Amino acid sequence: MTTRTTERFALRGAIVMRTPSTQARDDLYVSGGVLRAEPFDDTTEVIEARGAYAVPLTVESAVAQRPVEQRHAHDLVPGNPATFALVRRGVGESQIRRMLVIHPADLAAVYVSGHLEAFDGRPTRAAGADLADPALRAAWVGTWVDPSRGLEQHLSGDGRYSETRNGRADAYTGRYWVRDGRITYLDDSGFWAFGELLDGTLHHAGFVMNRR
């Protein structure tokens, strides 16, 4: 698979998981960061993705926080943000809903609102570049805690993170990137993971965190 960051593209031949529990070979059409219903014309960039899985970046605790009428906001359906991972292997429903982690060798791409965040297991920009924007820095940088699960997640202004778990400092460390309320992590131990900031609460892999 080859791809570039464009505003308008078609992802062809992937196994698309429109929801965590449904899948079918299909095409995805993206324009302006949003999934579209209709195919484009001959000038549309076509990305061949046959054999890969397009997986929604569902964060189940964030789904539960939304009003009922907004709980399909993560699904890969027309009108929703083009936010998904393209993975070289099958991914189970429970992984998507509870804790989606992907080894770099299995990750073809990550898109957030149609923007290419990672390609072929590697980030597309330097960690911390996003945080030059003062509004993003103010929204994300700091220590996020889930006391019920003994977690402190420290997001630094240089695009690095570390986690304290049950009092054990630096239990996980790595880099992170943010866009449109979504956070993409690349852990130093070798996996990608994902989260969502919703109404001041950070959701990730079953953790529900508020800033201290």
Image (cartoon, rainbow, N blue to C red):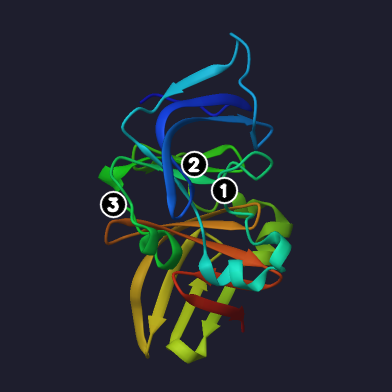
Residue tagged 2: 125
- Of the residues shown, which amino acid type is indicated by label 2? Arg
Mark 3 or mark 1: which comes first in sequence?
3
User: Is 90 on the left-hand or right-hand side of 114?
Assistant: left
Query: What residue do we see at 59% from left, 37% from top?
Result: 114
**Front-lying residue, 81 or 167:** 81
Q: Residue at x 59, y 74 (%)?
A: 142
Residue 195 visible:
yes
Q: Earlier in the sequence, mark 2 or mark 3?
A: 3
Pointer 1 local density, CA inside 10 Å: few below 14, some 14–19, many at least 20:
few
Nearer to us of marks 2 and 3 is: 3
The kind of residue tagged 1 is Ala
Task: Judge the density around disc 3: few (<14), some (14-19), many (≥20) Cα neighbours within 10 Å.
Answer: some
Q: How many marks?
A: 3
Q: Which mark is residue 87?
A: none
User: Is residue 158 depicted above or below 76 in this figure?
Assistant: below
- The foreground one among 22 and 139 is 22
Horizontal and vertical percent position of residue 150 = 43, 89
Q: Using the image as rendered, state which of residue 79 and residue 212 is in the foreground.
A: 79
Q: Which mark is residue 129?
A: 1
Q: Is residue 202 left or right of residue 103?
A: right
Q: Residue furthest top?
A: 42
Label 3: which residue?
103
Q: Of tags 3 and 1, which is closer to the observer?
A: 3
User: Distance from label 2 to label 1 (Cα)?
Assistant: 7 Å
Residue type, mark 3 in image? His
SS state under label 1? loop
Helix, strand or loop at label 2? It is loop
Tell whether 183 sits left or right of 151.
Answer: right
